[in-house]
Amino acid sequence: MSSLDAYDFHLPDAQIAQRPAERRDASRMLVLHRETGAIGDRRVTDLPGYLHPQDALVVNDTRVMAARLVGQRPTGGRAEVFLVERVAEATWRTLVRPGRKLREGATVRLGGGIEAEVIGVEPDGKRRVRFTRNGAPFANETEEREALDAAGQLPLPPYIERPADRADRERYQTVYARESGAVAAPTAGLHFTPALFEAIHARGVAQVALTLHVGYGTFEPVKVDDLRDHRVAAERITVSREAADTLNARRAAGGRTVAVGTTSTRALETSVDASGVFHPVNGPTDLTVTPGYRFRAVDVLLTNFHLPKSSLLVLTATFGGREAVLRAYRHAVEEGYRFYSYGDCMLIL
């Protein structure tokens, strides 16, 4: 089913989670069995019971940047610089507001003595911005990233209708976040705690980390009616040799590859060949999963609930079966599940 309209559903606004659950692992988990279509209502703490000793649980260790930087123009007017991608020393591709005021040569004063200067305008309207602190360059990339992180705010998704606060600094990151570079969290991973990992490891399951830096494209709507014409923006991934070797060993032993989230799924499907062998990868992926795609890497998917007519819902429905997934979504709405980034999750077996 290639029509975007076939991936729509009704969701009451009250079920869009505005804040995380009191505890990370307190979320509900809908379980969908692909072979039978059966649906079960469980908790995230039940996840270890669905895993097998030879399985590999794959997580995305990207860390969300404090990508939203708010400051003032020399005239005193408010301005916002949103980090998209680092392209050179202290130089970033960004989105800016107000765009008409921030042309080449414009400057914005940010917190901590940081100043942003627009040094170029790209064809799509994005700005190349160079950052300095107290009029001087940063000593190195680590100092630069730490300074921007201290000055910025976490970029919560637009459907969370409140500003980011201090609690989000912790809860909008996974407990295993390591590599800074994302503008949004890999939200299926937000449910995990050290205690949950202990229970998973006790079953003999291997934990494998890879990196996919979630880009600004995750917020962009699908703009075509026919999904065969849709392409997602490229995002940078890293799958190490160690990760690939572990995945291959677990698969050879009869284990399953269990992806935590759609981001892990895209990275895994990029790193596997036609025969099902995983390989190291370090570079961009523009893999777009649409109806008819054949999954070679992922056997089980844990994912949050996604927006109607979004590329993430299309990926999930392609993996779990469109009718089965949309029926599960209707069940989740009827049963009062919480949706989107800070909401509940779904395990597709």
Image (cartoon, rainbow, N blue to C red):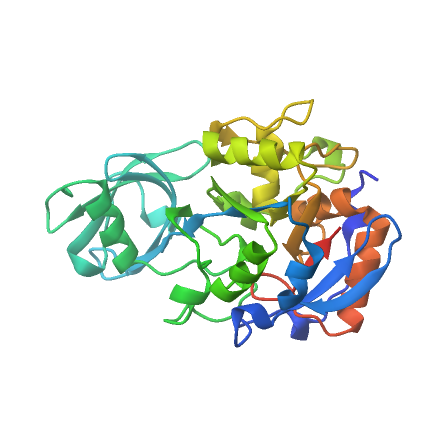
Spot occupied by residue 74 in the image (x, y as percentages of width and height): 20, 55
Q: Residue at x 57, y 62 (%)?
A: 199
Q: How many marks?
A: 0
Where the N terminus falls, by quadrant?
A: top right
Spot occupied by residue 174 in the image (x, y as percentages of width and height): 46, 58
Task: Look at the picture and state if 76 lies above or below 287.
Answer: below
Q: Residue at x 45, y 48 (%)?
A: 61
Rendering quarter of residue 338: bottom right
Left or right, 242 with reference to 42: left
Q: Nearer the viewer, residue 13 or 80?
A: 13
Q: Nearer the viewer, residue 34 or 214?
A: 34
Q: Residue at x 57, y 68 (%)?
A: 25
Q: Residue furthest top?
A: 274
Q: Is residue 66 visible?
A: yes
Spot occupied by residue 45 in the image (x, y as percentages of width and height): 62, 67
Q: Residue at x 67, y 35 (%)?
A: 230
Rendering quarter of residue 79: bottom left
Left or right, 94 with reference to 140: right
Q: Is residue 158 visible?
A: no
Q: Residue furthest right?
A: 36
Spot occupied by residue 235 in the image (x, y as percentages of width and height): 50, 36
Q: Nearer the viewer, residue 210 or 108?
A: 210
Task: Look at the picture and state if 144 lies above or below 14.
Answer: above
Task: Look at the picture and state if 72 lies above or below 162.
Answer: above
Q: Nearer the viewer, residue 127 or 327?
A: 327
